[in-house]
Amino acid sequence: ARLGTNEQYKQLVRLAHERGIKIIMDVIFNHVGDQHWFIHDLPARDWIHQFADSLPPVSYRAPVHLDPYGAEADFKAVTERWFDKHMPDLNQQHPQLANYLIQNSIWWTATTGQDAFRIDTYAYCDQGFMSRWNQRMLKEFPGIGIFGETWVHGVGVQSWFAQGLRANGHNSHLPGVTDFQMYYAMMDALNNETGWTSGTNKLYYTLAQDYLYEQPENNVLFLDNHDLGRMYNAVGEDLTKYKSAISLLLTLRGTPMIYYGTEILMTGQGGAFGEGGRRDFPGGWPKDKMDAFKEKDRQGDMAEAFNFFRTLAHYRHNSPALQRGKLTQFLPINGVYVYFRHTTAQSVMVVFNSNNESVTLPTTHYRAQLSGYTSATNVVTGATLKDIRQLTIGPKEALVLELQ
């Protein structure tokens, strides 16, 4: 099914640009649906992997791309087996198909003026082809945004898919990835006690491995998406933890991705890929019983969450430190994690208390980053802290402070 015409899509891009909004196209090179038009009339039989049933079952194990000891059968089970029984796997090593996919992407971008691509199921594609696709798109459209969905485990595995020369000679030329490792780390910090490598320390350890990326700031951060249960479920429908999650998302390095409805505490979980979270946003249609687009229909915790999110999102939009500033993090102390985003002109201090009780924090340990600053403004409440030598943070609370 199509939602509109090509001309309407071009109009959408134009109207979005007039409002300062960029458009990302989601593309899938790994597979198509079994009802796709060229599946019913294949230009060549080997445009898809025809005999994948002779391989081991699909494992979804991305490390086969980089495993120096890996078996060929396991590699092919990821790169040639169909992602699902109704999703024929594309053979991107076929030169005509590869050229078609590249030309198709160039056409969409040149025709519509869209700004970026999200590449679905990136880790299951032929990585040689993806490297060529990335290089060609960046050559044709310098500055275009590109990031790949890399639902994998471990920073070492995830970073292999990002741009940069690897030990086996591979260079993906992929500017950014969906940062599942930061998702896991943020959820761990929000929900678990701090241990040697768990809780807030998992967040610290994950960011400490950013040396594996050429440009970690290109990674896409998220708290939930269409394949996961809703974030509000993941934090136990705790409004304080929700606010802390949003605070981390909007102040850490990387580009934040907001799943629709997160701003109004939408819930949902279940299914192999979190399909329970994919229900419609409430509002926008005449028969909807409530319209969350309208302030009068946002009540109670929903209104509080929305206002919190909007305030912090607007602040980030206008903050050079949060958009482009350096990140300086400190080792968590007794479950309290502190980091700074800073430029020469602006410094933002973030303090997250992962404990179940309030904490009073002397700030002498952070004096190198606090040098020259004596007060701060809470960017959410607007309150002024005239003395920042000591901070009190509530249980599971995060403070976002602009230093002055």
Image (cartoon, rainbow, N blue to C red):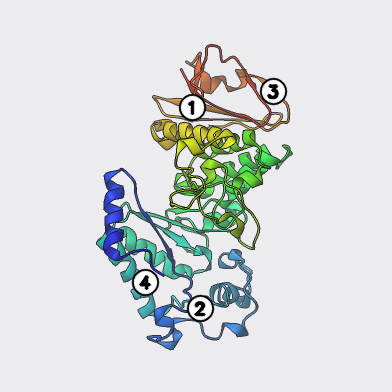
Using the image, tell me which numbered label, if any, was put on residue 348. Answer: 1
The residue singled out by tag 4 in the image is 101
- Residue drawn where x is 49% and y is 43% of the image: 292
Give the image quarter of residue 12: bottom left
Q: CA distance from mark 3 to mark 2?
A: 55 Å
The residue singled out by tag 3 in the image is 359
Mark 3 residue element: strand
Mark 1 residue element: strand
Q: Earlier in the sequence, mark 3 or mark 4?
A: 4
Q: CA distance from mark 1 to mark 3?
A: 20 Å
Q: CA distance from mark 2 to mark 1?
A: 48 Å
The residue singled out by tag 2 in the image is 88
Q: Amino acid at mark 1?
A: Val
Quarter of the N terminus within the rendering:
bottom left
Residue 252 in the image, given as x and y percentages of width and height: 52, 38
Q: Amino acid at mark 2?
A: Pro
